[in-house]
Image (cartoon, rainbow, N blue to C red):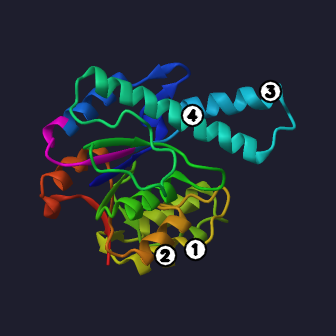
C-alpha cells in the first residue's frame, strides 16, 4: 500500500476552482502503477480557507471545534471531487466512499482509496500515519514544496525573523536518510500552534512507535522514483527504523 499525502492547495487552488490538470496527472500515475495499491489523502486547500472565512462572518463567536469541523468537511469535499474524476476516467478498483475514520479497518477489495480529515485536534499528517498503522502500510509519501528536511529544529527558529530563519535553514545540512528518533528530536512530541514543521510532532511520535513504516518527504516529481523502485535516485528525506 502506497499512502500519499497531498496538501489541499494542490487540488483546491481557489474558490470553486480545482486543478484538473494535476488531478489528471495523478490519475495517470495511479494507472501507470496499476499493480500497486494506493491510499491518497487530500487536504483542504483554498476551499478550507473560504469556508472558514464565511463561517466567521456569519458567526463571530464560532468555536475552534466548529472551525475544525468545517476544515475537515473541506477535505472530504476535495477528496470526493478527486474520487469522482477517477471514476470518470474509469480507473479500476476505486473505493466509492471516502475514508473518514483512519482507525476503522476496511477490506482490501479495492486498489485505490481516498481519505480526508478525521476529527478536531488531529492534523492530516497524523491521520496519514494512523492510516499507515491501520492498513499496515510500510510506505508513506508526504509531498512537500522543499527538497530535503533540514538538520535543525523548528523550535530553534520560531523566535527568529524571516531573514534570520532563511539564513539558518540555508546553513543547515540536508537530511537524506534518518531514523524516526531523529525526526522526533527535530520536531518534538507536542503540537505548537503556527510552528512550521516538516512533520506534525504527534505524527512523528506515531512513526517512532511503528518504526516499520518508511516515510518519504519530497517534491511531487520524486514520487515516480519511489514507486518504480529507484529509491537510490530519490531526492528527498527518508525516515525509517
Near mark 2 (Cα within 10 A), the count class, few <14, some 14-19 or many ≥20, is many
Taking the image as shown, residue 104 lies to the left or right of residue 38, namely right
Using the numbered discs, state the Cα–Cα distance from disc 1 to disc 4 in whole angstroms. 27 Å
State the residue in front, 225 or 130.
Answer: 130
Residue 147 higher or lower than 174, as above or below:
above
- Looking at marks 4 and 2 on the same chain, the residue that comes earlier in the sequence is marked by 4
Residue for badge 3: 57
Start-end of magenta stretch: 31-40
User: What SS does tag 4 mark?
Assistant: helix
Which mark is on residue 74?
Answer: 4
Using the numbered discs, state the Cα–Cα distance from disc 3 to disc 4 in whole angstroms. 17 Å
Which mark is on residue 181?
Answer: none
Residue for badge 1: 189
- Residue contact between numbered discs 2 and 1, judged by CB atoms under 8 Å: yes
Using the numbered discs, state the Cα–Cα distance from disc 2 to disc 1 in whole angstroms. 6 Å
Question: Residue 17: where, in percent of width, then height?
Answer: 48, 20
From the viewer's perspective, is the residue at label 1 or at label 4 nearer? 4
Question: Residue 213: where, in percent of width, then height?
Answer: 33, 68
Which mark is on residue 184?
Answer: 2
Picture residue at 12% right of the left edge, 52% below the top: 228
Quadrant in the picture for the C terminus: bottom left
Look at the image and say whether residue 36 sits in the magenta stretch: yes
- Looking at marks 1 and 4 on the same chain, the residue that comes earlier in the sequence is marked by 4
Near mark 1 (Cα within 10 A), the count class, few <14, some 14-19 or many ≥20, is some
- Residue contact between numbered discs 2 and 3, judged by CB atoms under 8 Å: no
Amino acid at each position: 500500500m502506497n499512502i500519499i499525502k497531498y496538501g489541499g492547495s494542490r487540488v483546491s487552488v481557489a474558490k470553486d476552482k480545482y486543478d484538473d490538470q494535476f488531478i489528471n496527472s495523478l490519475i495517470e500515475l495511479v494507472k501507470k502503477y496499476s499493480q500497486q495499491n494506493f491510499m491518497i489523502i487530500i487536504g483542504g486547500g483554498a476551499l478550507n480557507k473560504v469556508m472558514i472565512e464565511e463561517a466567521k462572518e456569519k458567526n463571530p463567536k464560532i468555536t475552534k471545534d466548529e472551525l475544525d469541523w468545517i476544515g475537515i468537511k473541506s477535505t472530504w469535499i476535495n477528496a470526493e471531487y478527486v474520487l469522482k474524476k477517477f471514476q470518470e476516467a474509469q480507473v479500476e478498483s476505486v473505493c466509492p466512499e471516502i475514508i473518514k475514520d483512519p482507525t476503522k479497518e476496511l477490506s482490501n477489495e479495492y486498489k485505490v482509496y481516498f481519505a480526508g480529515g478525521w476529527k478536531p485536534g488531529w492534523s492530516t499528517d497524523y491521520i496519514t500515519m494512523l492510516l499507515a498503522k491501520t492498513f499496515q502500510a510500510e510506505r508513506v509519501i508526504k509531498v512537500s514544496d522543499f527538497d530535503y528536511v533540514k538538520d535543525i529544529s523548528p523550535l530553534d527558529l520560531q523566535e527568529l525573523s524571516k531573514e534570520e530563519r532563511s539564513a539558518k535553514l540555508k546553513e543547515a545540512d540536508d537530511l537524506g536518510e534518518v531514523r524516526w528518533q531523529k525526526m522526533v528530536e527535530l520536531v518534538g512530541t507536542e503540537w505548537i500552534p503556527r510552528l512550521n514543521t516538516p512533520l506534525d510532532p504527534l505524527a512523528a511520535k506515531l512513526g517512532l512507535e511503528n518504526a516499520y513504516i518508511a516515510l518519504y518527504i519530497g517534491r511531487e516529481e520524486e514520487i515516480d522514483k519511489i514507486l518504480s523502485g529507484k529509491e537510490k535516485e530519490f531526492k528527498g528525506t527518508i525516515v525509517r527504523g
